[in-house]
Image: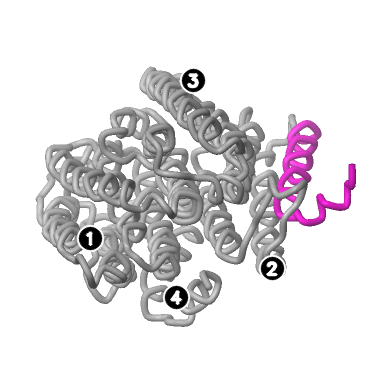
Amino acid sequence: MNYSQFLNMMPEAFLVLLLVVVFLADFFLLKDSQKTKKLGLITSGALIFQTCLLFGTMEPTSAFGGIYVTSQMVNVMKIILTFGTLIVVLMSHTWLETNKKVSGEFFMLVLSTLLGMYMMMSSGSFLMFFLGLEMASVPMACMVAFDKNRKNSAEGAAKYILVATFSSGVMLFGISFIYAATGSLYFEDVTAALTTSPLSIMGLVFFFSGLGFKISLVPFHFWTADTYQGAPTPVTGYLSVVSKGAAALTLCIILTKVFGSMVDYWNPMLWIVIVLSITVANLFAIRQSELKRFMAFSSISQAGYIMLAVIGGDPQAGATALTFYVLVYVVANMAVFTVISAVEHNGGNTQMSAYNGLYQTNPKLAFLMTLALFSLAGIPPFAGMFSKFFVFLAAVRGHEVAPFWPYFVVFIALINTVVSLYYYLLIVKAMYIKAEEHPLPTFQTDLTTKVSLAICTAGICLVGIASCIYEWIASAAI
């Protein structure tokens, strides 16, 4: 074997090295009172270095006969997901201080999941794709069950792993159909040999159903609310943005490149799923009083908006809009979950009623929460407005001949944007308008939480108006 090919997998190789370093550091710092802080510094510093490394390795590469293939767009998404993981590591410090004995395990699980997502996005065959998906899913289930003293945590993990197992079986069933129809698992070979036979169509449907679970698209979303509610808040934030971004880009690449000749079959399927995801999630979000369940349905709705970028007739514009949307979603959603984590740690809970009168005692947190919610709702001039505009534009591009259905889907999405504004404003109403005799007392957040919020707030305010960021993503899509 030519081991020099591992040099073409530098980001993945560095993550494996980082896993070893964290494991050894955890072993030697076992009785150190500053263990969590030191492990957090090691992991945060390594993730910053990893981001710089990815900026320096943007050129497309392949390894091991094409089973590993990467491109500039994949590397851009790796940078975004690494950035999101860094925010999760920062926001989890306060929570981990109460779980010092297992902080090392938490960091190793986070890095293992990120490694699986790297492999999934850089896959050149369905075999590597499935291995990457499972490498990301199994550690994620452990993270959901991380809080051993809470019944909801174990329940959420059980539902997650059961649905993940079922969806993996469905996906493997579809991959077997594709292999039977084409005689290969390599993306390039499948693309060349693929026909619109019933076997290929069934393979496409089963494959899409399996990956739809990972993105939380309706009707594959039933695990989401219980898992989000049961998982520790930093894990919920990680699950809502990093996992979703990797799966969305992978699905976009496979649909447009591998199943490009079957676009007339998967596009109507996407139209239905997008409309259902956005509409059903918005209607259920209005009914929620528990904030993490509320954000679960919000994430299902956001997944529908993300997939709008795929239905357009211009794959380059679609990939650019999707990646930009994920970047904006990372900073806005992580800001919300950082505030939720801070409130929960300082005597509050995850019920919406706990935020009644928050502005009276913690005006800065209430203000940052409002900015993040406005961005998620798509209110200008925040970054969320620009991300929604670009996915709407990508959805209708390339459909000049038969524009009705894409325009109809975008019209439904626009109506649902107004609905989402209503339920996001319910939290703002609780913080600013609802009076409370005994609101949450004033508290100070730690340094890592402040850094996490500062990064997210800067992203919410600047990513949309800094056109160079969108242009950089667009240049990678070419």
The disc at residue 59 is 2
Q: Amino acid at mark 2?
A: Glu
Q: Relative to 279, is 295 on the left or the right?
A: right
Instruction: From the viewer's side, name the closer residue of 184 and 252.
Output: 184
Q: Do labels 2 and 1 touch, CB within 8 Å?
A: no
Q: Is residue 97 left or right of residue 365?
A: right
Q: Nearer the viewer, mark 2 or mark 1?
A: 2
The answer to whether the residue labelled 4 contacts the one labelled 3, judged by CB atoms less than 8 Å apart, is no
Residue pointed to by mark 3 = 148
Q: Secondary structure at mark 2?
A: loop
- For the residues bearing labels 3 and 1, Cβ distance under 8 angstroms: no
Which residue type does callout 1 highlight?
Ala
Q: Earlier in the sequence, mark 3 or mark 2?
A: 2
Q: Which residues are magenta?
A: 1-29
User: Does residue 264 sit above or below 96 in this rendering?
Assistant: below
Give how far apart the Cα atoms at labels 2 and 1 are.
35 Å
